[in-house]
Every structure is written in C-alpha cells, then in structure tokens.
Amino acid sequence: MTVDVNIEFRDYYQEELYMTADVETGVLYNRSGRRMLALTDDFLIGLHRALEKECGERADLVIHRCGRKWGFNFGEGLTAEWSEFYGAPFSSFPLAMFQSLLKQEFAHNGWGRLEIHYELLEQGIVWLSLQGAIMAAIREESKDTKADILTAGIVSGMYSYFLNRDLDCLQTQSEAEGFPDSRFVISDASRIEQLREQVKPGDSHDEILSGLKKLIGSTPEG
C-alpha cells in the first residue's frame, strides 16, 4: 500500500448511515447495500458443538478452513465497498487509513476491539490483539487457547485477499484463558503451518512469536 495518496476522508462508518433496517421486509443492510445478519451466542456455540461432534479431532481444521474461505470472500467484498465509497482503488489507500477502516469494521460487526501491530512487518509478521473476541467471550468456561479459531480463519482469509499472498493466522492467546485480550499472528502460510506443529501447550504469545522469527531466519527467503 502507498502512503502518499491524498484521499478525501469521509466516514464510511458514520453511525446513522452505516446500517439500515427495512422493518417491512425484516432485512438489515449496510451502507453499500450488503445484507447483514445478526447471529446469537447460542447459534455460534451450537455451530461449534455440531462441528466438533461431526468432525471429531478434525473440527478445528474444518472451522479454520470455513473461516478462511468466508474471510477471503468477505475481504473481496469489503475492499470493493471501500473503493467505491472513496472513489479510489483499495491498493492506493494509505496504511493508516486501511488500519482505521479495518478496526471500525471489526467494531461495527461485533467482532471486538482490534489493534494491529506492525513492529515485525519487515520480518514478514503482523500480529493482532482483540478485546471482546467473538468466541472467547461466550466460551470463557472452556479456558481454551484456540477459542477463536474461527476468527483466526477469517483473519487469514481477509489478509490473504488484502495482500494477494497465501497467508495464514494462528491464535497465540485467548481471553478465555483469562488474558486481557486475544492475540493472533499472521505470516506466510507455510511458516504458520510449521509453527502450528511446533507450538506446545502453555507457550506464551512472545514464545510463539520467537519461534516464528526463528523459522523465518532459517529459510533462504527470510
């Protein structure tokens, strides 16, 4: 993304304009006319439990892949909406503008309060912190490090589309474990796959990041 393009800033997420409800048809639309759907906690919990029952040990993989597919398609639609609204291609958006829009998208969809961390960007790593993550808040009793594996899948798909690269995302800590936020690390898909196999129960976010940096440093392209 470039940082020298002057795009007039208008608020795509202006509260009174972003979401519109047609009470006669019972349909909810966003500003661009995309139909929105509100899902209850019970639905999300039921979906996870059904997949866990049907898929057994492969449930996490299935949930992640579902999230990834949906996230990729969502990223495609989202960038088209932003580009149309601002009258400029998404690829020309300044990084700060992209970050602001993505944080607002998460908040307005009820996915949590997002922060994006770029201090390791030159090493091919971005990590996210999320307060109020979707599943962690409703599966708190699980104490599960991977409570938000669906979110990790969504993020991997979105960023793969945003950056036109095969990326993946791994959750490194969860609010369900008692942490103040959930955290996710994004990098090249092959490296994340290697990292996923190396992570041990109890590994901290910093330890997982350190392991990923070692993987990158051990490869020729790193």
Image: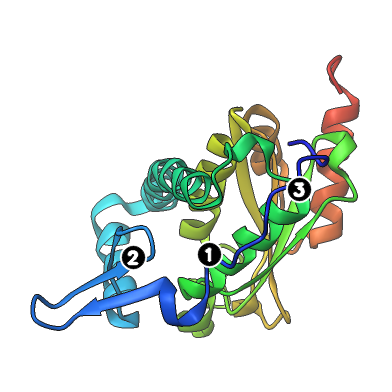
Q: Secondary structure at mark 1?
A: loop
Amino acid type of the residue that numbered disc 1 sits on in the rendered structure: Tyr
Q: Nearer the viewer, residue 179 or 156?
A: 156
Q: Which residue is mark 3?
A: 95
Secondary structure under the numbered disc 2 in the rendered image: helix
Mark 3 / mark 1, whichever is N-terminal = 1
| Cα separation between marks 2 and 1 | 32 Å
Which secondary structure, mark 3? Answer: helix
Q: Earlier in the sequence, mark 2 or mark 1?
A: 1
Q: Position of residue 111 (x, y in %)?
A: 51, 71
The CA span between labels 3 and 2 is: 34 Å
How much space separates mark 3 and mark 1, taking CA atoms?
A: 16 Å
Task: Please give the name of the residue rendered at 27% of the width and 75% of the height, measured from the top-left corner.
Answer: 43
Residue 64, horizontal then vertical, whole percent: 45, 49
Q: Residue at x 35, y 81 (%)?
A: 41
Q: In what quadrant of the picture does the N terminus appear?
A: top right
Left or right: 27 in relation to 75: left
Q: Tell me if 24 is positioned left or right of 191 in this view.
A: left
Name the image quarter holding the C terminus: top right
Return the residue at label 2: 48
Q: At label 2, which amino acid type do we have?
A: His
Residue for badge 1: 12
Q: Residue furthest left?
A: 24
Query: What amino acid type should be assigned to the residue bearing mark 3?
Result: Leu
> Residue at image x 49%, y 74%?
108
Disc nearest the viewer among 3 and 2: 3
